[in-house]
Image (spheres, rainbow, N blue to C red):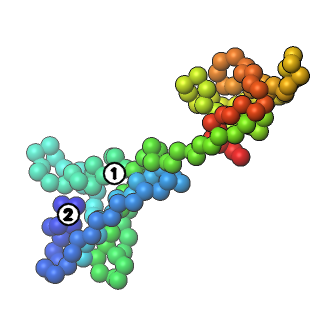
Amino acid sequence: MTNALRAPAPSDRQVGVRIAHSSTDGLLRLEVSDAGSGRPELRHPRADDERGRGLGLVDALSHRWGVTARAGGIGKTVWAELKAPDLLPTPSTREVAAVTVSPGQQIRVWGAWRAIRTVRTARHATGGLTVVLGLDEGPPLHLPAAEPLSVRGLP
């Protein structure tokens, strides 16, 4: 950003900043655009240099970065992408009957989300249908077929 503000350009030119995220990739993209003609260079400043570290920081902290021509042909946009997996959307949760769950889904049980590994049904002693869920942690879970569960994952 500092370089964009210092770039030699006519006084009526503006510096643009754009921040976007891709929930598909878990990336945060930062863009700074200016009307200057220069291209940024990765420098290797000495310990007592007071300038020249900005792009080195971008290079060290980002997943990837680059420079593209600015739309309209005047200047450039310097961009950097940071890994931000916490920006991925959380899977939607819905309530379903135990008998409808499938392996690969997750259910909320014992205060945490647990992945379903196996599903089978059995007859309960009273004649009703019981669903037996094998989970990624803990013992198998035996539930009445109509028991409502909070589920996320595959339909």
Foreground residue among 89 and 41: 89
Give residue 12's position: percent from left, percent from top: 16, 81
SS class of the residue under badge 2?
A: helix
Mark 2 → mark 1, Cα distance in angstroms: 15 Å
91 on left or right of 17: right
User: Mark 2 belongs to which amino acid?
Assistant: Asn
SS class of the residue under badge 1?
A: helix
Which residue corresponds to mark 2? 3
Give residue 7's position: percent from left, percent from top: 18, 70
Q: Residue at x 49, y 48 (%)?
A: 88
Residue 43 in which image quadrant: bottom left
155 on left or right of 9: right
Foreground residue among 56 and 110: 110
Does residue 72 lie above or below 46 as drawn? below
Give me the disc on residue 59: 1
User: Mark 1 belongs to which amino acid?
Assistant: Asp
Q: Residue at x 39, y 60 (%)?
A: 20
Residue 111 in which image quadrant: top right
Q: Earlier in the sequence, mark 2 or mark 1?
A: 2
Q: Residue at x 45, y 52 (%)?
A: 27
Furthest-front residue in this view: 126
Q: Residue at x 40, y 54 (%)?
A: 28
Tell me, yes or no, if residue 38 can be seen here: no
